[in-house]
Image: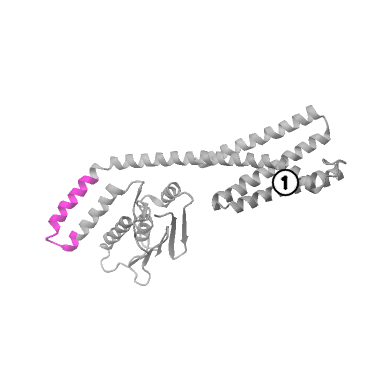
Amino acid sequence: MEINLLKHKWRWHTLGWVLVFAYTLAEGLLLRGSKEGLLLMLNFNLLRFIEFYLCYLLLFPLWQKYRQLWLLGLGLLAVIAIFIVLRYTIEEVLFPVWFGFSNYQDPTLPFYIQDNSFYAMPGIFMAAAVYNLEKAQEKSQENLVLQQEKTKAELAFLKTQINPHFLYNTLNYIYSLAYPVSDKLASAIIKLSDLMRYMLHESTDGKVALQKEVEYLHNYIDIFRLRFEQHFFVDFTIEGSLNGQRVASLVLIQFVENALKHGVVNDPEAPVRISLQLGGSQLCFEVTNRIGTQQKDHTTGIGLANVRRRLDLLYPNAYNLEIQKTDHTYHTRLLLSGVK
C-alpha cells in the first residue's frame, strides 16, 4: 500500500511540473513570441523546480524531524540564497555569453537581492503547501490503517474468547487438584493460568502497565524453564524503576520467545541475556543469545515483521529497532521513546 501511495504521489508531481513547463512553452511561443522571453521563463521555472524540491525533500523533512526554528529559518535563507545565486549566474553571467542578452540592466546588488527574494517566496509557499497537505493525507491514511488493524485485532480477540475462558477455568480447577500433590506442578499451572489471563484480558492493541508486561515475561521464562530444569540459564536484568509506565501489550515477548526457541539456553558460559533499561521517558530492551545448531521449534509467533508493523503504527517516529546477527550470536535492541 505504501509503495502504491508513493507512486501515486510522484505521478501527481510529474503531471504538475509537466503542466507548468507546458504552460511556459505555450505562453512563451504564443504570447511573447521571443526567444529571450521563452528562455527567461523556462529558466525561472527550472529554478523554482530546484527551489521546490530543496524545501520538499530536504528542508521541511529536517524541520519535521528536529522542530528547531533556527534550523528552519537558516534553511529558508539558504534556499533563497541558492535561488538568487543560480538566477544571477545563469541570467546575468551565462546568458550574455551564450545568447547575447541578460535579464536585468546593470542592477545594484541590494535591488537584485530584494527583487529576487520576492520572486523566491512563491516556490517556498508552494512547497510548504504540498508537503503539509501530503503529510496530512499520510497521517489520515495511517490512522485509518491503525483503526482497521485495531478492529481486526478486536474481532480476532472476541472470536478466541470462548475457548480460552474454558481453558483458563479448567486450569484453575487442575491447579486445585495439583496443589496437594506437587508444589512445582501447581506453580507451573498457576503461571500458565496467569499467562492466559494476561492474553485474555490485556492483550489488545492498546497499552498496558509495563509492570504487567514484565510479569508476563517472567512467567513465560519460568514456564520455558520447566523443559530444562537445572540446565537453563537466562539473565534478566532491569535498570530503573517500574513506576506506572505504559507500553503496547505483548510488544516485548517476541524477542524473548525467539531467543528461547532458537537460541542456546543450557550453556552457563553463554546465557541468554535480557536487559530492560528505563531512563526518563525512554525504554531500552535488549536480548542477546547464542545461536543453537540443534533442531528448534519452527513456529515464529506473530513474527518480527509484524512486530515492526505494530511499532510503526503505535510508535511512529518514536522507536528504533536494531537486529544484529553473526555466525554465533543474535542480538536485538529496541529503543522506545515517550514511555510514560
Which residue is found at the position 22% from the left and 45% from the top?
165
Is residue 53 visible from the viewing direction of this image? yes
| Left/right of residue 81 with respect to residue 149 in the rendered view | right
Whole-percent x, y for residue 32 in the image = 80, 30
x, y (%) of residue 184? 19, 63
Q: Name the residue under label 1.
A: 83
Magenta stretch mostly in which secondary structure? Answer: helix
Q: Is residue 176 magenta?
A: yes
Q: In this view, does 20 lie to the left or right of 251?
A: right
Q: Could you say which is closer to the camera, residue 74 or residue 132?
A: 74
User: x, y (%) of residue 216?
Assistant: 30, 56
Against 296, residue 267 (above or below) is below
Name the quarter where the C terminus is drawn. bottom left
Q: In this view, does 60 lie above or below 218?
A: above
* Residue ranking furthest to the bottom: 269
- Residue nearest the viewer, comparing 327 with 70: 70
**Quarter residue 234 falls in:** bottom left
Would residue 79 appear left or right of 103 to someone viewing this image?
A: left
Q: What residue type is labelled 1?
A: Phe
Q: Farthest right residue?
A: 100
Q: What stretch is highlighted in magenta?
A: 164-186
Residue shown at the point (79%, 27%) measured from the top left: 31
> In the rendered structure, does residue 257 fall within the stretch colored magenta?
no
Which element carries disc 1, helix, strand or loop?
A: helix
Picture quadrant where residue 144 is located:
top left
- Residue 331 % position (x, y): 43, 62
